[in-house]
Image (cartoon, grey):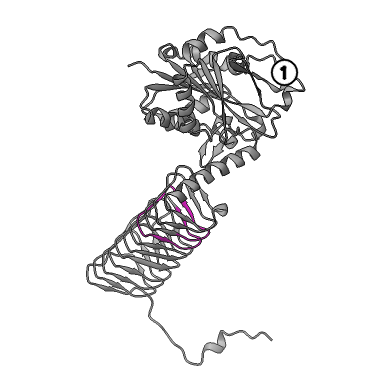
């Protein structure tokens, strides 16, 4: 089946004003990259509208690096991603010509969208609006526009006749520069019209570039659609704009979540990535960061200062203040913190408790297990209802390899105990405080491994030092 829609994303820019050691499409954006957002929005549009289509990325600066990122992150995508190369930065029409040259399947499409890699806030909704306008009103091309009180730097929309034209800043007259309706750089175009019209575009302008905007004519069958929300079309050219775009994306996400029943104590001091999922009934306190592919189920509470990254919290979980979770699973009704640290591979069981200043790494705690104070649990399994005392340490690293500690269910492990892995403690065992365990313990056993206390009366004065 041939594709009806081709979505072209212009991603050849260098991004020197960002001052990052990255090609512009790979600039960081909400724990992803700039280019992730137009790709995801395009695929969501094709999915929602059940359209057959493909994406075409026009690459240029450090194209190998950008191409590698795309291959690593979108290799299993349902929609094909083609790549084209713009050898020189000769303008937007030249970039689109690169796509038409390198992606032969464009000839089978009916509609071509043009997006920029540096406009991350555009969503599938805007694509749908442009597509419907193009098809329902039988236009050759439509452009998204918006109004701004500071139009400097944007192409101005000059309406007249049956269509409109776009005049770039450098080519605008003094009068035209007062126009506040501006070009977003986002278009939907009938492919046949694009192929025919782009051949006639020249670079006879003050920039010496081939402008795709020259497709639009005042007497043409084209239409400018003015959107009320200008923030949707924010472009990222420097770090200030990048920061603003991230804020817009996060605020948009949190407002959506609030409508779905998530309570934010202070929206202005909370940071939730667009990729995050949070269910109704959850309460998020200020200065919380929820990032990446995190999933928060119903009725969770996340207290101030906590960081949740690429983690899953099941229903009813409580994350107390200043806890840090990364690549972990916390099961139903478990409690973490305050000041808990869960590192990658931690799986905290139902109704378990991880207390203050406890670190867990690559360890599974079963239902009802408790590690309440000042402990490190790494490369371990801890059974149901086992209680771990204060100051517990799994000594899992011998300098070359990591080894596993296994503690069964219904055990009591006294304070200040070290377990030198590999070691296994059977169900229902009791380990006395201050023990260093380096041998496995059968189920139901009592173990103590510490030196015998020796008391010498009246000897303290030999060791006490006077301040005089």
Quadrant the C terminus occupies: bottom right
Could you tell me if residue 86 is visible in this image? no
For residue 39, side relative to residue 444 (left or right):
right
Q: Is residue 312 magenta?
A: yes
Total numbered badges shown on the rendered structure: 1
* Residue bearing mark 1: 171
Question: Residue 204: which quarter of the image?
Answer: top right
Q: Where 189 falls versus 353 (above or below)?
A: above
For residue 154, side relative to residue 125 (left or right):
right
Look at 61% across and 41% down and name the residue there: 244
What residue occupies the far front of the structure in this picture?
161
What residue occupies the far right of the structure in this picture?
174
Quadrant the N terminus occupies: top left
Give whichever of 100, 413 is nearer the camera. 100
Q: Is residue 100 magenta?
A: no
Q: Where 306 falls versus 390 (above or below)?
A: above
Where are the magenta residues, as a range?
302-325
Name the spot of residue 254 as percent of width and height, x first: 49, 48
Name the spot of residue 188 as percent of width and height, x first: 50, 21
For residue 452, side relative to residue 69 (left or right):
left
Question: Residue 430: which quarter of the image?
Answer: bottom left
What residue occupies the far bottom of the structure in this picture?
458
Give whichever of 443, 326 is nearer the camera. 326
Name the spot of residue 447 as percent of width and height, x first: 29, 73
Q: Where 467 falls versus 225 (above or below)?
A: below
Mark 1 packing: few (<14 Cα in 10 Å), some, or many (20+)? some
Look at 66% across and 30% down and name the residue there: 16
């Amino acid at each position: 089946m041939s594709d009806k829609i081709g979505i072209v994303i212009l991603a050849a820019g260098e991004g020197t004003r960002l001052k990052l050691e990255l090609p512009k499409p790979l600039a960081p954006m909400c724990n992803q990259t700039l280019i992730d957002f137009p790709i995801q929005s395009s695929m969501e549009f094709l999915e929602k509208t059940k359209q057959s289509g493909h994406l075409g990325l026009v690459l240029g600066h450090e194209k190998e690096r950008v191409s590698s990122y795309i291959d690593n992150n979108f290799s299993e995508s349902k929609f094909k991603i083609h790549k084209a190369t713009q050898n020189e930065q000769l303008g937007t029409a030249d970039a689109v010509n690169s796509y038409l040259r390198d992606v032969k399947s464009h000839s089978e499409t009916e509609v071509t969208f043009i997006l920029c890699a540096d406009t991350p806030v555009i969503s599938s909704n805007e694509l749908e609006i442009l597509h419907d306008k193009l098809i329902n009103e039988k236009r050759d091309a439509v452009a998204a526009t918006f109004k701004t009180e500071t139009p400097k730097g944007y192409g101005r929309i000059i309406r007249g006749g049956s269509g409109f034209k776009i005049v770039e800043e450098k080519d605008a007259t003094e009068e035209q520069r007062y126009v506040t309706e501006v070009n977003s750089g986002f278009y939907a175009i009938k492919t046949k019209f694009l192929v025919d019209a782009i051949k006639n575009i020249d670079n006879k302008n003050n920039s010496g570039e081939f402008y795709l905007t020259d497709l639009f004519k005042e007497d043409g069958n084209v239409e400018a659609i003015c959107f009320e929300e200008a923030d949707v079309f924010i472009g990222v050219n420097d770090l200030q704009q990048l920061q603003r775009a991230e804020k817009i994306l996060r605020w948009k996400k949190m407002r959506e979540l609030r409508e779905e029943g998530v309570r934010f104590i202070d929206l202005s001091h909370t940071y939730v990535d667009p990729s995050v999922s949070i269910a109704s009934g959850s309460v998020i306190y200020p200065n919380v960061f929820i990032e990446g592919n995190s999933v928060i189920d119903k009725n969770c509470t996340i207290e101030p200062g906590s960081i949740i990254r690429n983690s899953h919290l099941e229903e009813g979980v409580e994350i107390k203040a200043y806890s840090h979770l990364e690549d972990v699973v916390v099961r139903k009704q478990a409690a973490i913190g305050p000041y808990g640290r869960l590192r990658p591979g931690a799986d905290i069981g139902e109704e378990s408790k991880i207390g203050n200043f406890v670190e867990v790494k690559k360890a599974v705690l079963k239902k009802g297990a408790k590690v309440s104070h000042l402990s490190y649990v790494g490369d371990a399994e801890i059974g149901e209802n086992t209680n771990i005392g204060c100051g517990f340490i799994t000594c899992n690293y011998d300098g070359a390899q990591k080894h596993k500690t296994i503690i069964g269910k219904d055990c009591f492990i006294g304070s200040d105990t070290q377990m030198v892995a590999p070691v296994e403690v059977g169900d229902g065992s009791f380990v006395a405080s201050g023990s260093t365990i380096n041998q496995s313990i059968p189920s139901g056993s009592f173990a103590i491994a510490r030196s015998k206390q020796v008391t010498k009366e009246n000897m303290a004065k030999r060791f006490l030092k006077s301040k005089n």
